Amino acid sequence: MRVVLVSGGVISGIGKGIIASSSGLLLKTAGLKVTAIKIDPYLNVDAGTLGPLEHGECFVLADGGESDLDLGNYERYLDIQLTRDNNITTGKVYQAVIEKERRGDYLGRTVQVVPHIVQQINDTIERVAKIPVDDSGATPDVCIIELGGTIGDLESGPFVEALVQLRHKLVRDPESSFFNIHVSFVPLIHGEEKTKPTQHAIRQLRSAGLVPDLVACRCDASLDDATIKKIAFSCQVDLDQVIGVHDMETIYQVPILLEEQGLLKLLHKGLQLDKIPLDASRKEEGAKLWDLWKKTIDVPKDLPPVQLALVGKYTSHMDSYLSVVKALEHASMHLKRKLNLINVDSEHLEEAMLKKDPSKYKEAWAVLEKVQGIIVPGGFGNRGIEGMIATAKFARQKKIPYLGICLGLQVAVIEAVRDLLNKPNATSEEFDHNAEHKAVIFMPEGSKEKMGGTMRLGTRPTLFQAGTEWSKLRGLYGGVDVTHERHRHRYEVNPDMVDELESKGFHFVARDDIGNRMEAFELKDHPYFVGLQAHPEYRSKVTRPSPPFLGFVASSAGLLDNVLKEIGEEKAVVNGHHF
């Protein structure tokens, strides 16, 4: 077992996830199989009930697991498929131990943090580290573990103790190894790079029982040589064990920055990678991956722009839409366009805002007037919904490319029922249980009593309907009959209104495998007016953009016909899967 632990000091939120993902990518370019685990010390069992404005987006995995957004980074960088077990939380650990205690597994013993909680953590790590994460079915060679928060946090104490014990076990095994990347922060104050916070962070790491094999210093610009020497001397590490990770133009350049500073060489030595037998095909596959990565992110700085608006209710904290933004970036890079994304608070588009703050109302609508495309992503609750509905109507009538994701699909359906079917009071059951015209209804298999893990979650099949060969969306998927995307919702389009909507030209081009649940709509006489109940952004990759997002950005940039032609000619399997 080979483990790379990415821990943090000084402050949280300085890029441990990107450094962990980048480290894993470098290992993959060497031909290795890599998996990843995120440890979150909070008491929640998973991220499903966490508010996006506090914690960022909830990333949905193929098995329906609701996880921390960093698992999205791992999947995007490493092109792997993780499970709910790859996100370990305090809530999950204590729940498992308490269930064992109630079952009688510890009968006669006092259940304690040490050894029982700590042992549960390490048992989970060792089990999950062996789960295959790609189509090869092979056991991963290396497991990246990111420890959330910072060393010294009270809530992460049991996890730190578990990792100390795991390190002790692995370093004694000649076939195993443990490599600790400690991410610190070097602030620039009055023009001077301050090393004292890093010195204290390393001292605290060592006092906890861990030893830094690499000190990754986050900073605004490249560190001075004198600063690196001072940190190395003060922290008792060699010069090559201190690297500066300064801000880059894009996060996709971080792997290149780390490789240039010798991280892969350090990992090769520290993990004893020479003991892993690699055939020529795996090495060649790794080299091709690295070439493709560099080629994909190497885009000219003077690219023509594509200006898009994201209309949502969580725009004050854009990590709430992290996967959506990344999917837009992937599509833009693929199309060689510079993404200019403007965030619009949907509440600012409502008539109530015109009375409350006319300037915000006018500014919001001015944005929609000038952009080339509009995306409305997912969300919950009735705040800002009327602004989203107005946005959908604006995009439909003005022939502006529109992509609705989950809630974005539902608000567009509500708008269509109101306008096309002349039912002005139509809404969703989520917003009004007693509404006369429910365009969107609660799914019968859902639960209104229990919130956690009760939505329609994970990968589900989407079947394109007969007679939809004209569909741009279907064409983007390569003209297939079935596609698979990840879902997260508890409300759906009211099937009783489908026939009437379709008679007005509002086509539901895809349904679920039963045929009763609407999965996607599209308008024929529109450049790109598409909505999906699924969340295709969760499967978008740096080197393989999501088909609906690719189509949306391409349509906004005036390139959709070219993209569809290219896909048709090559019979391409977009997004790397046989749908």
Image (spheres, rainbow, N blue to C red):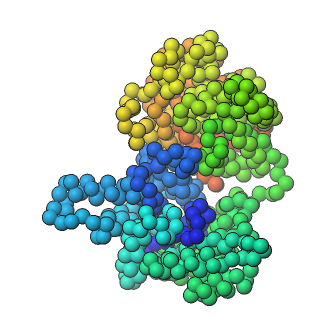
Q: Is residue 228 left or right of residue 171?
A: right
The image position of residue 354, as x and y in percent, is: 74, 26
The image position of residue 488, as x and y in percent, is: 49, 39
Q: Nearer the viewer, residue 250 or 425?
A: 425
Q: In which quarter of the view is residue 373 placed?
A: top right
Residue in the image at 58% along x and 15% along y:
425
Q: Nearer the viewer, residue 278 or 76?
A: 76
Q: Quadrant of the N terminus?
A: bottom left
Q: In which quarter of the view is residue 260 placed?
A: bottom right
Q: Is residue 299 left or right of residue 72?
A: right
Tell which residue pokes out farthest to the front in this image: 356
Res. 5 visible in picture: yes
Tell which residue pokes out farthest to the top in this image: 422
The image position of residue 144, as x and y in percent, is: 49, 67
Residue in the image at 65% along x and 45% along y:
316
The image position of residue 528, as x and y in percent, is: 70, 31
Residue in the image at 36% along x and 33% along y:
449
Give the mark count: 0
Q: Vertically, is 55 above or below 456?
A: below
Q: Nearer the viewer, residue 36 or 28?
A: 36
Res. 562 visible in picture: no
Q: Vertically, is 515 above or below 12?
A: above
Q: Is residue 577 left or right of residue 111?
A: right
Residue in the image at 76% along x and 46% along y:
340
Tell which residue pokes out farthest to the right in this image: 302
Q: Vertically, is 493 above or below 254?
A: above
